[in-house]
């Protein structure tokens, strides 16, 4: 379903009010992270709304960056050499593991060993 430019709950109504036999088969709804979609889905018999992959990646990236910066600042304050390596690791952390280069795999292994929380 594409809600369009002026997204509103009313746009989702026809899609989320299918014929009774189709509504009974509805178990999950995949949608973006907009709050209004969750409000509409909450009144449906489906078990829940699942965010699309794009939004999951965006949310994970938004959570990862501040955590990585905190760790870099903590390492710098403690005089650790790992701060410089961790500073240049953003793309290594975000990249799909099968697409990592050999150097990026080594960097990721070092991060996992030294900075488990990240």
Image (tube, grey):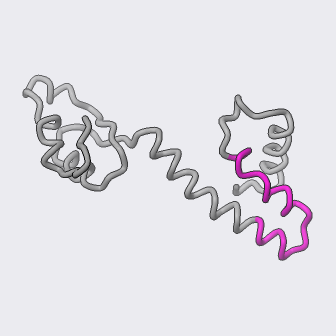
Percent x, y of residue 4 = 24, 44
Is residue 9 in the magenta section? no
Which residue of the protein is positioned furthest toward the left in this rendering?
20
Q: Is residue 45 above or below residue 62?
A: above
Which residue of the protein is positioned furthest toward the bottom in this rendering?
77
Say whether residue 38 is left or right of residue 9. right
Q: Majority secondary structure of the magenta segment?
A: helix
Q: Is residue 106 above or below residue 69?
A: above
Say whether residue 58 is left or right of residue 6. right
Label total for image: 0
Check the picture and name the quadrant holding the C terminus: bottom right
Percent x, y of residue 105 = 81, 38
Is residue 77 in the magenta section? yes
For the point 80% across and 51% down, the residue is: 111
Percent x, y of residue 50 = 36, 41
Say whether residue 14 is left or right of residue 83. left
Which contiguous range is marked in magenta? 72-93
Percent x, y of residue 71 = 74, 65
For the point 90% across and 73% down, the residue is: 79
For the point 31% across and 42% down, the residue is: 49
Q: Is residue 67 above or below residue 32?
A: below
Check the picture and name the quadrant holding the N terminus: top left
For the point 80% across and 33% down, the residue is: 101
Which residue of the protein is positioned furthest toward the top in this rendering?
21
Q: Where is residue 35, by image quadrant?
A: bottom left
């Amino acid at each position: 379903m594409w809600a369009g430019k002026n997204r509103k709950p009313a746009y989702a109504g026809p899609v989320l009010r299918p014929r009774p036999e189709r509504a009974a088969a509805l178990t999950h709804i995949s949608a973006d992270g907009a709050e209004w979609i969750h409000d509409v889905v909450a009144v449906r018999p489906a078990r829940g709304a699942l965010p699309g992959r794009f939004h999951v990646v965006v949310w994970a990236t938004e959570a990862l960056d501040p955590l990585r910066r905190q760790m870099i600042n903590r390492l710098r304050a403690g005089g650790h050499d790992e701060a410089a390596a961790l500073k240049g690791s953003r793309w290594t952390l975000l990249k799909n593991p099968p697409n990592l280069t050999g150097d990026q795999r080594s960097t990721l292994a070092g991060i996992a060993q030294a900075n488990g929380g990240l």
